[in-house]
Every structure is written in C-alpha cells, then in structure tokens.
Image (cartoon, rainbow, N blue to C red):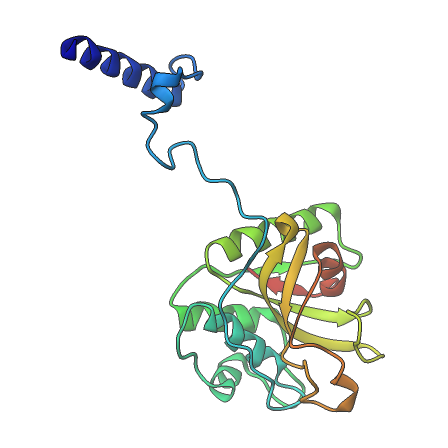
C-alpha cells in the first residue's frame, strides 16, 4: 500500500509539473491539486493599495516640486532629505521646478535607482497615454514606488482654487484596480493661502481625470 501511494504521488506530481511548464494537459485531478505549493498558480491581484508615506506641506508657494518628491521618497526612505536639499538638486527657485525631469533625477539619485523616467502626456491625452498611466500606477505602487505628477489646471479636483495652476503632486496609491489614483497634495490644507483651505491633504480621483490634469506636462514613474 505504501509503495502504491508513493508511485501515485510521483505520477501526479510529474503530470502537474508538465502541465505548468506547457508540456501536457493543465487540468489537475483532485489528488494533484492537493500537491500544488502555495503561490504556484499566482496571487489574486489587489484592487486597491496605498503606500505608507509621510505627508508634508510645502514650505513656500513655489516648493511643490521638492515637497511632492519628498513624499514620494518617504514611501521607501525613513528619513528623506529636506525640502531645501531636494529643491537645490531640482534647481527649484521662486519660479518653481522647471520640469518633471528634475524630479526624475532627484528620485533616482536619492533612492540610488534607475526606476524612474519622464512620461509625457499630451493635451488632450491619447488613449495609449491613459492606458500607460493606469499601467504605471498599478505596477509602481505594487512595487513600493510612489509617483509624482506635474499637473495643470485646466481640469482640477473639487475644492481647488480657480485659474491656471502649475503644480506637483505625489501619487501614492490606487483603487478600483487602477481606475482611481490616490493623491498626496503638498498644497492641501492651505499652506500657500486661504484659497487652498478646502483642498485635502490626500484625496482620490479617477485615473482618467489624472491624465487630463497632467495633460501637456508629464509624470515620474
């Protein structure tokens, strides 16, 4: 009896391995199902995830770039550099941070990585750009990397001041399997004036709207 059970186990395991490698049928019997190691068939993807990060308000009305960068860094660093240190790396002055490429450079530098690249979005966004943003959002967050978006209003979240606003925000999570994005806003709660008091520190918007908001600029992912 022991010998027969041993042979059945070998045959079942061999059949399962061949199926997983594409050399045979992939339908496993009840006996082979019991022998599948945990995780072999893959985990069910998350539908929502927000990274652990530290929110911070921007020190100056032109300092959203370094502050959004610092919040993104905080998802992977216990003690990111100061806003002023990041701002010096990004070339930030009273006119702001020139381009998201400066943010890409800072993120890669301080994390000692080549993870981040500049991803432009046209105005209006193309279908391919919207799809790539959603793909980048889920992939980056699942791997523990927050993103940074250079946004232009235009389109704006509820509570935002009027007028054309050039701004940087950290993108720290997703919901609805990537159809929504979680935003950490360095201008939330009014550090740059009373017109910003109704802007939350963190909020969720649709990823389609995020693409529209970034339109004519770019994001770091």
- Residue at the outermost left position: 3
Residue at the image position 50 percent from the left and 61 percent from the top: 116
Q: Which of 98/57 is in front?
A: 57
Count of marks, rendered view: 0
Q: Is residue 199 left or right of residue 168?
A: right
Q: Is residue 196 left or right of residue 178?
A: right
> Can see residue 21?
no
> Can see residue 209?
yes
Residue 105 placed where, x, y %? 49, 70
Would you place residue 194 above or below residue 38 in this image?
below
Query: Which image quarter: residue 19?
Result: top left
Q: Which of 155/126 is in front?
A: 155
Query: Which image quarter: residue 34?
Result: top left
Point out the image quarter for the N terminus.
top left
Q: Which of 168/183 is in front?
A: 183
- Residue at the outermost right position: 162
Would you place residue 211 above or below residue 94 in this image?
above
Residue 78 placed where, x, y %? 39, 75
Point out the image quarter for the C terminus.
bottom right
């Amino acid at each position: 009896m022991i010998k027969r059970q041993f042979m059945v186990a070998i045959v079942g395991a061999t059949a399962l391995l061949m199926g997983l490698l594409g050399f045979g049928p992939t339908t496993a019997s009840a006996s082979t199902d019991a022998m599948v190691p945990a995780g072999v068939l893959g985990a069910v993807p998350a539908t929502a995830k927000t990274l652990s990060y530290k929110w911070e308000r921007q020190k100056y009305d032109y300092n959203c770039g370094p502050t959004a960068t610092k919040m993104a860094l905080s998802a992977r660093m216990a003690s990111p550099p100061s806003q002023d240190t990041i701002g010096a790396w990004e070339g930030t002055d009273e006119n702001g941070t020139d381009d998201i490429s400066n943010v890409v450079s800072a993120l890669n530098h301080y994390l000692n990585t080549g993870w981040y690249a500049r991803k432009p979005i046209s105005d209006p966004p193309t279908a391919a750009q919207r799809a790539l943003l959603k793909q980048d959002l889920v992939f980056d967050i699942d791997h523990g990397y927050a993103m940074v978006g250079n946004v232009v209003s235009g389109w704006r979240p509820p509570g935002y001041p009027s007028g054309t606003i050039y701004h940087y925000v950290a993108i720290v999570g997703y919901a609805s399997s990537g159809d929504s994005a979680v935003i950490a806003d360095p201008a939330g709660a009014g550090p740059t004036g009373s017109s910003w008091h109704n802007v939350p520190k963190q909020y969720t918007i649709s990823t389609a709207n995020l693409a529209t908001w970034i339109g004519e600029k770019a994001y770091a992912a």
